[in-house]
Amino acid sequence: MIKTSLVLLAISAIIAAIVYYRFPKHSLLRPLAYTGAEHCKGCHDTHASGNQYGIWAASAHAAAYTALRSDSATQYAAAHKLTIPAENPACLHCHTTAYNVTAEHKAVGYRPDEGVSCEQCHGPGSDYGTYNAMKDKKLFVKLGGIEGAESDCIHCHALSLHAEHCPFQTKPFDLIHAMQVIAHPIPTHNDAAPRE
């Protein structure tokens, strides 16, 4: 009786593990989670990766949350009787990644103070953040990865100042220039070796 119970328990554990690790991406059993840019850094902060992490870290996206704590943002909010920018959902929507997702969708490494990070464009990285997924685009997508598109930008950046936009955006958004600024392609094999 005890042997049968142990065998059934072991089989149940194996089935549960298979379901947990292989269940489709938007599973109730295992929701995708935002891991934070530091999770990406290990592989994407190298010459072979095109220093993608470094490009992001030097960008305005990385400083987007910090901007909410600036004197000008605080003064603007006070003058217009608005919530503190770093706590205002209207500001956090564009100045952080995953500002409004529930705790179960945030892994231990997630930090809102990373600003607009990798996962804003590429989706929550809990499942696709592996070496194998990064080498196989189909697997990357199957595990919840998103390539990222120009259309993602206009959720926060207004193409026209006639549209509702952040008061600190003082000119229309130049999508073509912005895409060049944040471009972070993986180098081709010939470009991967350091130049002498």
Image (tube, grey):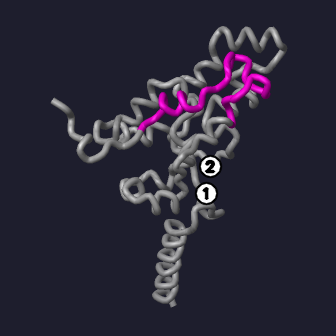
**Residue 82: image x %, image y %?**
81, 18
Q: Which residues are magenta?
A: 155-184
C-beta proximity under 8 Å, tags 2 and 1: yes
The disc, 2 or 1, on the residue closer to the chain's N-terminal end is 1
Front residue (pair 166, 78): 166
Q: Secondary structure at mark 1?
A: loop
Percent coordinates x, y for residue 46 in the rendering: 31, 37
Q: Is residue 172 magenta?
A: yes
**Left or right for 69, reference 180:** right
Q: Tell me the amino acid under the disc marked 2.
A: His
Does residue 31 lie above or below 183 as drawn?
Answer: below
- For the question of whether residue 152 can be seen, the reply is yes
The residue under label 2 is 105
Q: Secondary structure at mark 2?
A: helix
x 57%, y 50%: residue: 33
Residue at mark 1:
31
Number of disc labels: 2
Q: Based on the displayed image, in which of its 4 quarters is residue 26 positioned?
A: bottom right
Q: Residues within 10 Å of mark 2 (few under 14, many from 20)?
A: some
